[in-house]
Amino acid sequence: MKKVWLDAGHGGTDSGALGNNLREKDITLQLVLHARAYLEHNYSVDVQVTRSTDVFVSLSDRANRANAWGADIFVSMHINAGEGTGFETYRYPSQEGSQSSLLQKELHTEILPTMRKFGTIADRGLKTANYAVLRETNMPAVLSENLFIDTTADAEKLKNATFLREVGEAHARGIAKYLNLPSNGVTFYTIQSGDTFYSIAKKYNITVQQLQD
Ligand SMILES: [Zn+2]
């Protein structure tokens, strides 16, 4: 099974960026928990997180733990600050076509349109940076900066629980596309006129008992 490491930026004594009565560490945790739930609900995949509560973890520990676990990919979620606006993603400086660059493309093209269902979102682009968690991880790694906490219009979206869920789930879909994750086998079938337990079981090559269970 593929192994996905999800990294919620900051935590504990490190609040991350602050603004508009929001703390970066709270939002990044929400995004990660939504992404994990979506991955585990829809795919056959092994997910680990840096933190599932409000605790401090050093940058090197984040990378070291993902390396020790043998994660196939590492995705770190953050909220931007500095009075800009919009969405951007980062990979460690590497050529176009590297695995991190392919992961970055899948994430970026899944998350941005999802955000835009909630209004205008500036595309700040696919960028590179020498960030510790990108440099010290030894698998494809991407860091997302999900809007600006200190810009009012962005903060309004970050206060919307539905926005956070959808953005977290969009991270999960980008990950699933990059890793080509198999579905977890849960199939939804709409009952049609004339169906019987027997005909449906036969169609899916399972027993009537399995279907009824
Ligand atoms: Zn951050």
Image (cartoon, helix red, strand yellow):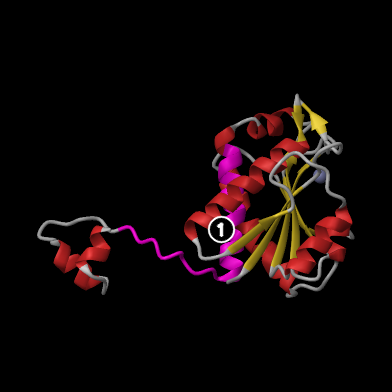
Q: Position of residue 93 (x, y in %)?
A: 85, 66
Tell me the residue at 80%/38% (across/down): 84
Query: Residue sitting at 14 percent across and 61 percent down?
Result: 195
Magenta segment, which residues? 163-188
Within 10 Å of the Cα at label 1, are there few (<14), some (14-19), or many (20+) other Cα atoms?
A: many
> How many marks are shown on the rendered structure?
1
Q: Quadrant of residue 143?
A: bottom right
Q: Is residue 32 magenta?
A: no
Q: Position of residue 20 (x, y in %)?
A: 76, 25
Ligand 1's quadrant: top right
Please name the residue that numbered disc 1 is placed on: 173
In the rendered image, residue 96, in percent from the top left (x then y), is placed at 76, 72
The residue lying at 62 percent from left, 52 percent from top is 111
Q: Can residue 43 be seen at all in this image of the molecule?
A: yes
Q: Could you tell me which quadrant the N terminus lies in?
A: bottom right
Q: Is residue 143 above or below residue 115?
A: below
Q: Is residue 41 left or right of residue 75?
A: left
Q: Is 184 on the left or on the right of 96, as rendered? A: left
